[in-house]
Image: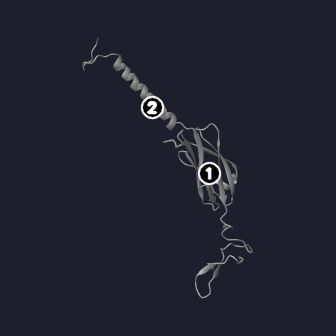
């Protein structure tokens, strides 16, 4: 029987430990790849989902790849392309240098923009939606003339500077 410099015999026990260690490392690496680094779901992020129609408001479109554990895949920034389907006259697109995000600038007309987002990470295009709101005041906060305001109108208290709600008043 052959011996190694440490005096132990070089036999099946040493070879079995080596094979077991290599197999364990390969299985652990495969599990990490399968559960952490392989995409199972892709979603489009539009941040913020609604902007004002003032000509300067912007939204950022990006793709979020999720793994089997439900978390974002680390070190993933897939390239994307945006194609407007509805409301293309309402916005303008600008791609960032690496094409991983698209900056959408709203125009002056309110409406809804629906666009397709394509990426090599998914076989099918994803749909995204951006709402462009007008710059007018909300009708819930400032009711129209002749409508009951539900306590938003204020009535001055005689002899003081404080105000109290007057739900029985009609807005002027």
Could you tell me residue 106's position as x and y percent? 63, 57
Instruction: Determine the image quadrant of residue 79.
Output: top right
Residue at the image position 36 percent from the left and 23 percent from the top = 17
Asked whether, in this view, residue 171 is left or right of residue 25, the answer is: right
Image quarter in which the C terminus is found: bottom right
Asked whether, in this view, residue 59 is left or right of residue 147, the answer is: left
Residue at the image position 66 percent from the left and 58 percent from the top = 132
Residue at the image position 42 percent from the left and 28 percent from the top = 24
Work out whether 79 lies above or below 113.
above
Q: Residues within 10 Å of mark 2 (few under 14, many from 20)?
A: few
Q: Residue furthest top?
A: 1
Instruction: Determine the image quadrant of residue 136.
Output: bottom right
- Mark 1 or mark 2, which is nearer the start of the sequence? 2
Could you tell me residue 22's position as x and y percent? 41, 25
Q: Are marks 2 and 1 in contact (CB under 8 Å)?
A: no
SS for tag 1?
Answer: strand
For marks 2 and 1, give the CA distance: 43 Å
SS for tag 2?
Answer: helix
Q: Residue furthest right?
A: 146
Of badges 2 and 1, nearer the viewer stands 2
Work out whether 139 lies above or below 40.
below
Could you tell me residue 159's position as x and y percent? 60, 88
Where residue 93 is drawn, which disc sits there?
1
Could you tell me residue 35's position as x and y percent? 51, 36
Q: Residues within 10 Å of mark 1 (few under 14, many from 20)?
A: some
Asked whether, in this view, residue 113 is left or right of residue 62, the answer is: right
State the scheme by which the image is colored: one colour
Where residue 28 is drawn, which disc sits there?
2
Image quarter in which the N terminus is found: top left
- Which sits in the foreground, 138 or 156? 156
Where residue 114 is drawn, which disc sits there?
none
Q: How many marks?
A: 2
């Amino acid at each position: 029987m052959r011996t190694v410099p440490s005096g132990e015999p070089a036999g099946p026990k040493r070879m079995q430990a080596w094979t077991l260690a290599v197999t364990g490392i390969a299985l652990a690496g495969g599990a990490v790849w399968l559960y952490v680094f392989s995409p199972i779901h892709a979603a489009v992020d539009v941040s913020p989902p609604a902007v004002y129609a003032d000509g300067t408001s912007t939204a950022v479109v990006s793709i979020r790849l999720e793994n089997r554990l439900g978390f974002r895949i680390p070190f993933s920034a897939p390239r994307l392309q945006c194609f407007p389907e509805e409301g293309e006259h309402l916005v303008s697109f600008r791609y960032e240098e690496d094409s991983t995000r698209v900056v959408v600038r709203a125009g002056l007309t309110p409406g809804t923009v629906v666009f397709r987002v394509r990426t090599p990470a998914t076989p099918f295009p994803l749909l995204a939606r951006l709402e462009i709101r007008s710059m007018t005041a909300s009708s819930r906060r400032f009711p129209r003339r002749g409508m009951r305001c539900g306590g938003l109108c204020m009535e001055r208290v005689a002899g003081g500077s404080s105000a109290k709600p007057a739900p029985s008043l009609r807005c002027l």
